[in-house]
Amino acid sequence: MSGAAFEGPLSRRERVRLRGREDQPPRPEWPPLRDATLAISILIAAIGLGSHGYAHLDPALFGYLGATLVAAFALAWRASAFWRRPASAFYARALFAAVRDPRRVWRTVAYAGRDLAAQDFIRRRSTTRWLAHLLLSLGTVVSFAITLPLVFGWMFFQPAGDRAYRVVLFGMPTLRFDVDGAVGWLLFHGLSLAAVAVVLGAVYFLQFRWRARRLPGATASFALAPLALLVVVAVTGLALPASRNWPAVFSIAAALHQVSVVVLLVALPFSKLGHVLVRPLQLGARAVRARDAAWRRCAGCGAELAPAAQQQAVSELLAARGLRFTTHVEHCQACRRRQVAAAQAALVCVPVRPHPAQVPARTQMEGGAPSPPFDRLRVNGISTVSAEPVDARPGALQDPEETR
């Protein structure tokens, strides 16, 4: 970074103020705790209302119920804490503004269907990986959609004849279906189908990470443990209907399934699976970077730089932490490298000027003019860009093409 990019050292008063902030103990995160407490209170009240005063709760599912409440509290706390961070709050405000704007709401809904539901951003990288992620995510969502109403007592089945049942939803009788019919088969085998989808998706990503095990973090427990736990939950869930004719095996499978589900639910907010809390912010990023938004251009070459709102938010966040930049954030990466090259050349007393000859067509400015160059050169063994020696000493500044 050149010396002109930074406004200067902090004053003594500012250093004392920042040092005082560092010495103070961290304040308790009351807003996230408040939000989590409010969310769990609403959930408990909804369980009571939907189950007719907790009368329809199944004692066999109390373990799942306790783990679900713990996971709900932790998820609400983590989501509130993350979305309240200054950087996240910027995109959250942009998302809410887009939803409230009638001219942009349908575009946001279309992005949600493409990015969140269809997960098209993964398909653009690999169709196989997209299918595996789709199986994993849809299988997990279907499992929760079937299991949670049963655990909360919102849904149960009543006999409606010798070979028929009726679905009771929130205490109201609804759908009647035959055991041997298509609806009955889907209801009774929905969890098994979801488990097969989860196993296929999780196994693909496990072998994918095993093949990439030489890469940093590919085989970290943070990435492998959730996948392995999902496989255990799905396999033990599939073992329940398969072992219904062997009571001893069924008891073991039921115990293992309940333990694995409880561990998954409790660890869910703190594992990689918690990325579902972050992904909706992508819609806010799309709203910020929309083509009809105001964009800033590089002060050096005029190339398109960043959305004006995003650049202003970054400058404010840096200033709030004592980092006062002036012209640095107004230049693109190529122009910043040129500033670095000029600063490095000044250290070795080599006058430089922009290279006028080798001009790569990096981007096009307004009017069709190409952007300025950013040739890569070398100053005393240090790789730089966009510098040409003027009366330079021999060997002080060399083009890498000449030194190969």
Image: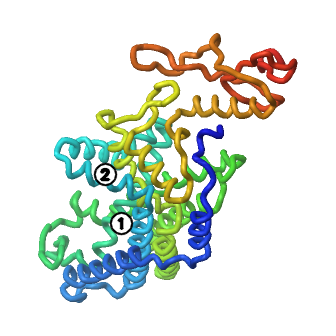
Badge count: 2
Using the image, tell me which numbered label, if any, was put on residue 95: 2
Q: Amino acid at mark 1?
A: Phe
Q: Is label 2 or label 1 in front? A: 2
340 or 224: nearer the eye? 340
Residue at 27%, 64% in the rendered image: 187
- In the rendered view, would you say 210 is above or below 245? above
Kindly state the secondary structure of the residue where label 1 is placed: helix
- In the rendered view, would you say 93 is above or below 36? above
Q: Is residue 224 visible?
A: no
264 or 243: nearer the eye? 264
Kindly state the secondary structure of the residue where label 2 is placed: helix
Which numbered disc, 2 or 1, marks the residue that appears first in the sequence? 2
Distance in Å between CA atoms under marks 2 and 1 = 26 Å
Q: Amino acid at mark 2?
A: Leu
Residue 281 percent coordinates (x, y): 38, 53
Judge the density around disc 2: few (<14), some (14-19), many (≥20) Cα neighbours within 10 Å: many
Disc 1 target residue: 144
Query: Which quadrant holds the C terminus?
Result: top right
Q: Does residue 74 appear left or right of residue 98 in this picture?
A: right
Asked if the residues shown at circle 2 and circle 1 are in contact, with their CB atoms under 8 angstroms apart, the answer is no
Residue at 20%, 52% in the rendered image: 100
Residue at 32%, 44% in the rendered image: 287
Q: Is residue 90 visible?
A: yes
32 or 118: nearer the eye? 32
